[in-house]
Every structure is written in C-alpha cells, then in structure tokens.
Image (cartoon, rainbow, N blue to C red):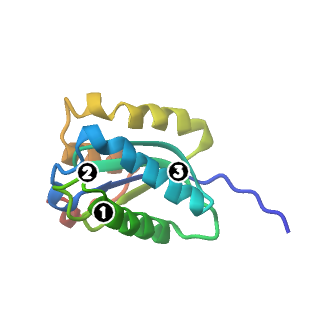
Amino acid sequence: MSYYYRVLCHIVFRTKENRKSLPRENISSLYGFINDFTEKKHGHLFCINAIDDHVHLLCEIPPDISLADYIRQVKGASTVWLGQTKKFPAFDDWANGYIALSCGWKEHETVVKYINNQQAYHKRHNLTEELRALLVEQEVEIDEGFFP
C-alpha cells in the first residue's frame, strides 16, 4: 500500500516560566539534537531557530505518529539531553503546552523566513506578543492560562 503526505507544522514551545536558559553560543547543539530526533522518527526538520526562552520548528511528522506524541517526545528527550550536556546550566524544563500551526507547502518559505528572522523580530516584540500574534493570525481562540 502506498500513501503520500505533506503535512507541515510550525511548532513553538517555550522554557519553563519563560526562563532565558538557552544561551546563543550553545544553541546549535540543541538544533542538531532536535534534527537527529526528528529524523529518527522518520520526520523532516525544515527549519529551527530559538531565542533564549523558546524554540520554533517547521517540520513534517510522518502520519504514524501524532503531533501531540511527537511534541511530547521531543520535549521530553531534549529535557534529558539538555540536562546531560551541561551547556545549558540554567535550563530545568520546558513549559507545559505548545503552539502547533499547520502550514501549506506554498507557505513554507514564508514560515522559514519568519523562523530564521527570530533574533531581529524579538528586538521589537516580546514572546507574549509574538505568541498572541501567531494565534490571532490563525484565528485560534486564546486561553489566557497559556500566558504567564
């Protein structure tokens, strides 16, 4: 049996209590870990970028794993890895929850540019403003409990 899929997800998850615990000088090792993890799950990571308190991914997850399972597993595995590397001494956990938005193939280059532009974006906007804007743009009902 053959099947075809192209399901892209823009995923954002943040550090516990939005702690600034992802230092720029070590972040590429986290990118490599998440990329390797995604490939082991037979997914594909198109783009990843982080600011000191959150991570953005644009990825394709195979249809035999649910989005929620992928996110739970990548957050869990990276928490263990981050604790073992000693490159992220201020990191103690990811916050509960996440944002996952679908992205069409025709939009993926725009999302890649947005993710790659995070450092410049956050010179003008804080994390709460960014997350709210993403949710409003996609017409997602906002649960105020998600925001600190």
Query: Mark 2 Cα within 10 Å, few/some/many (few <14, many 20+)?
Result: some
Q: Measure the alpha-carbon separation of dots 2 and 1.
A: 8 Å
Residue 93 horizontal/vertical position (percent): 24, 65
Quarter of the figure that contains the N terminus: bottom right
Label whose residue precedes the other's in the sequence (1 or 3): 3
Q: Measure the alpha-carbon separation of dots 1 and 3.
A: 25 Å
Residue 85 horizontal/vertical position (percent): 30, 57
Amino acid at dot 1 = Gln
Note whether 97 is above or below 15 in the view shown: below
Q: Residue at x 44, y 31 (%)?
A: 113
Query: Mark 3 Cα within 10 Å, few/some/many (few <14, many 20+)?
Result: many
Residue 19 shows in the view: yes
> Which residue in the protein does label 1 denote?
84
Kindly indicate the quadrant of the structure image that contains residue 4: bottom right
Residue 9 shows in the view: no
Note whether 112 is above or below 15 in the view shown: above
Q: Nearer the viewer, residue 19 or 122?
A: 19
Label whose residue precedes the other's in the sequence (3 or 2): 3
Foreground tag (3 vs 2): 2
Q: Are discs 3 and 2 less than 8 Å apart at CB?
A: no
> Which residue in the protein does label 2 denote?
87
> Which residue in the protein does label 3 denote?
59
Q: Nearer the viewer, residue 21 or 55?
A: 21
Amino acid at dot 2 = Lys
- SS of the residue at dot 3? strand
Residue 58 horizontal/vertical position (percent): 48, 47
Q: Measure the alpha-carbon separation of dots 3 and 2.
A: 25 Å
